[in-house]
Amino acid sequence: MQEYWRRLADGVELSVNQTGKFKTGLLGVTLTIPLSAGTATAGALIPEVLSRGSRNHPSMEQLSAATDALYGASLGPVVRQRGESQCVSFLCSLIDDRYALDGSAVLEPAAALMGEVLLDPVKEDGAFRREYVASEGANLADRIHARVNDKRSWALFRLIQEMCAGEPYAVDKLGDAEEARSMGPEKLWAGYQALLAGAKVNFYYGGTAQPERVEDAVRRSFGPLLTGRTAPVHCWVEDRPRGPVRTVTDAMDVTQGKLAMGFRTGGITMASGSYPALLVLNALYGGSANSRLFVNVREKMSLCYYASSILDKIKGLMVVSSGVEFAQFDRAQEAILAQLEAVRRGEFTREELTAAALTVGGSLRGRLDSQGQLEDDRLTRLLFHSASEGVELIQAVESVTADQVVEAAQRLELDTVYRLTGKEGG
C-alpha cells in the first residue's frame, strides 16, 4: 500500500491510496464547510437532491442504469460530521480495472459520472427541480424526527446538545426538520452555489490506478472545483469543563432510563502525543467487552443493562452511555465514576492493559481491510492534521504503558450528566 498526496489548488487536495488489496476501488469527493445552524439543513439536503438526477441522467432510474453499465458501480451521498465541520461527500465503489472485460477503463467514466451528478444537476427555472426538493426535504425531515425513536442514541444526542451548547459541535449535522420540509428550490440552489464556491475539497482514490491517472481523471471531471479557495477547517477543543458539573433531566414515555455522562479529555485529541494512551484508556474503561464498566458495573453489580464509553478524537470528548432502572440513576452514576477513579489510581492489572491494547489494535487493523474506512480515516487525518494513522498508530497503541493510561485518565473531567427518565418520574 502506497500513499500519495497532492495539492491541486489552494484548499483542494487529492489523496491516493495505491493498493492491489481489494477487487473494488473507491473514488470519493468531499466538500467540507463549518457546521452551523444556518447552513446545516441545506448541506444535508443538497446531496440527496443531486442524487435524484443530472442533466444527462435526469431521473434515479437513468442514474441507476448508468452505474449498472459501469459493472454495477455504486454511487451515493454521505453527510458526516467531523468535529465542528459538515462533510458533504459522494462516494463511488467501482470494480478495479484488473477485473473489467477487455481491459476497459472504469475509473474515468466513473469519475465523469460523479462529476456530472455533483456539478451538472437537472434544473427547473434556473434552480433545482421543485419536485425533487420537496420530496427529499420531507424525507430529511422524517429522518431528523426519527432520531428520538432510538432512545440510546437520543440520550447521547441530547447530552452533546447540553454539554456543548453554544459550540458549533452541538449543531445537528442533518439540520432542522421544519426548515428541510419548507426549503424552496431557489434557496437550496443558493446554498448549493455557496457550497461549491466556499468548501474545502478533498478527493480520494483507493485502488490500483497510478496517481497521475487519478489526477488526470479528477481534473477532467471536476474542473469547476479546482479553483483556489480559503476554506480553513477548525474545531475548538475545550481542555476542561467551563463550570461545575451540570445534570440535565428529560422525561419521556420510556420504560428504561438512560444515563449519559460527558467528559472533557484535557485537550487530548487525535493530534496529541497522548492519543494512543487515550485509546487504550477508553477500551480499558468502557470501550470493550472486557472493560471495567462492562465487567463490574454491568455484570458484577447489575446496575446497568449496558454501559460503555466512546471517544470523539477530534473534539476531545469521552462519553459514557448506559441504560438503567429509574431508581438506580444515582448508584449507577457513582459506580461509573468509581471505576474511573480506580483507573486513575492505577488499579488495573497487566492483563487488563494488554487486553485493552489488543482490542484497540484489532479494531485499527480491521479498518485497514475496508475501503470505506480507509477513506474515512484519511479524510479525518487530512482535515485535522494528525500524523498518526494505520500501522504507525497500531504500533503506538501496543507500546502504551500503564503510567500513560493513568496520566490520560487523570486528565479526564466530568462536564455534564444527562438523564432520560419516565414521565412519572420513575
Image (tube, rainbow, N blue to C red):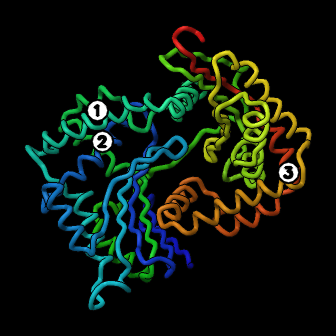
Question: Dividing the picture into quarters, in which one does residue 60 lie?
Answer: bottom left
Please state which amino acid type lies under the numbered disc 2. Leu
The percent position of residue 153, horizontal first and vertical second, equals 52, 34
User: Which residue is found at the position 48% from the left and 69% from the top?
Assistant: 15
What mark, if any, has residue 312 been given in the picture? none
Q: State the residue in front, 255 or 391.
A: 255
What mark, if any, has residue 45 been given in the picture? 2
Query: What is the tally of numbered marks visible in this picture?
Result: 3
**Residue under pointer 3:** 404
The percent position of residue 162, horizontal first and vertical second, equals 57, 23
For marks 2 and 3 on the same chain, the one whose residue lies earlier in the sequence = 2
Q: State the residue in front, 399 or 333.
A: 333
For marks 1 and 3 on the same chain, the one whose residue lies earlier in the sequence = 1
* Disc 1/disc 3 C-alpha distance (Å): 46 Å
* Disc 2/disc 3 C-alpha distance (Å): 44 Å
The quarter of the image holding the C terminus is: top right
Return the residue found at the far top. 424
Q: Is residue 310 left or right of residue 284?
A: left
**Residue under pointer 1:** 180
Please state which amino acid type lies under the numbered disc 1. Ala
